[in-house]
Image (tube, rainbow, N blue to C red):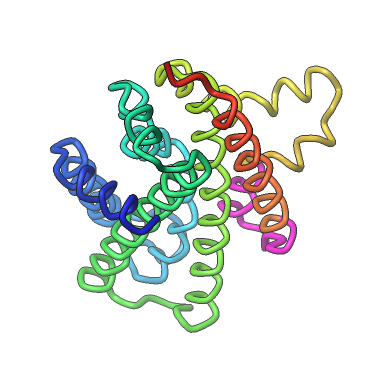
């Protein structure tokens, strides 16, 4: 397992597109800091912390790029069969891809928010209201959002495994993540909206205190369902 993950990162870190993404996302965070923060405590570190949760809606949109690095590329180049026929179990193969995806996601979250807060701290005055309570509240939202991203990663990997086409899987991911809510409302199934990943992200980016327990529970169940689904699909998948 460890060797598979090491090989995965060796391959990914040799890709130019990965380094472009690795550099461009932190630069985007810097650009967001340099843009005047509107509202209370504009242009202060306090304002940067107040705005930080609004950025949590963007990583979910970038997840297909990460799963493209870990699994999509092997599907496109048809190298999955070689790896599994080498003696690697299908379950081990999928878990290695899942762990690699999660580690990459953590890397990007740390880089983006580390750059964001470091730039804000170096370029802005403190402002009013900055303190341990505000810092804890912001970090709690980011941590809870990471659980949502993990569930979204499982969804993206499931779609790649099942559909076997990168473009179809990406469109299906965006459709399920962003358009399930209006469909449920159209069919008068609004109660189901509360259990969508997009709803959890909206709760974390909103002004009201989020229900962390509920968000984590929904994320955990979604993560488990799509991981199990991926394993089932992969076990039955024809690799020819």
Name the residue nearer the viewer: 70 or 53: 70
Q: Residue at x 64, y 35 (%)?
A: 229
Residue farthest bottom in this picture: 132
Residue drawn 76% across and 42% down? 194
Compared with 130, 220 (above or below) is: above
Q: Position of residue 28 (x, y in %)?
A: 25, 47
- The quadrant of the picture occupied by the C terminus is top left
Does residue 202 show up magenta in the picture? yes
Q: Quadrant of the N terminus?
A: bottom left
Front-most of 16 and 125?
16
Q: Residue 91 vs residue 102: left or right?
A: right
On the picture, is 198 further left or further right than 165? Answer: right
Please give left or right for residue 239 compared with residue 21 in the image.
right
For the record, the magenta segment spans 199-214
Nearest the eye: 237 or 221: 237
Say which quarter of the image contains residue 183. Answer: top right
**Measured along the vertical axis of the image, is residue 219 above or below residue 135?**
above
| Above or below, 141 relative to 93 | below
| Camera-side residue of 195 and 133 | 195
Q: Main secondary structure of the magenta part?
A: helix
Q: Could you say where residue 201 lies in the image, as x and y percent from the top left? A: 59, 47
- Image location of residue 171, percent across then percent down: 48, 19
How many marks can you see?
A: 0
Residue placed at 67% from the left, 58% from the top?
Answer: 216
Left or right of residue 91, residue 1 in this image: left
Residue 144, magenta (yes or no): no
Rendering coords of residue 57 (x, y %): 49, 44
């Amino acid at each position: 397992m460890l060797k598979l993950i090491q090989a995965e990162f060796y391959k990914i870190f040799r890709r130019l597109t990965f380094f472009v993404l690795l550099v461009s996302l932190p630069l985007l965070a810097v650009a967001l800091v340099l843009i005047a923060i509107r509202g209370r405590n504009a242009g202060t570190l306090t304002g940067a912390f107040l705005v930080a949760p609004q950025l949590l809606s963007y990583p979910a949109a970038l997840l297909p790029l990460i799963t493209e690095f870990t699994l999509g590329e092997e599907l496109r180049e048809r190298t999955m069969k070689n790896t599994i026929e080498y003696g690697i179990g299908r379950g081990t193969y999928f878990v290695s891809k899942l762990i690699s995806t999660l580690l990459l996601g953590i890397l990007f979250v740390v880089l983006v928010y580390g750059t964001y807060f470091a730039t804000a701290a170096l370029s802005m005055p403190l402002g009013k209201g900055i303190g341990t309570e505000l810092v804890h509240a912001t970090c709690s939202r980011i941590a809870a959002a990471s659980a949502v991203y993990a569930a979204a990663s499982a969804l993206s990997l499931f779609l790649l495994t099942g559909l076997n086409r990168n473009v179809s899987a990406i469109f299906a991911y965006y459709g399920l993540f962003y358009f399930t809510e209006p469909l449920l409302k159209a069919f008068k199934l609004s109660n189901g909206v509360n259990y969508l990943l997009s709803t959890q992200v909206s709760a974390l980016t909103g002004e009201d205190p989020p229900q962390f327990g509920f968000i984590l529970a929904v994320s955990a169940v979604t993560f488990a369902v799509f991981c199990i689904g991926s394993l089932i699909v992969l076990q039955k998948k024809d690799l020819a």
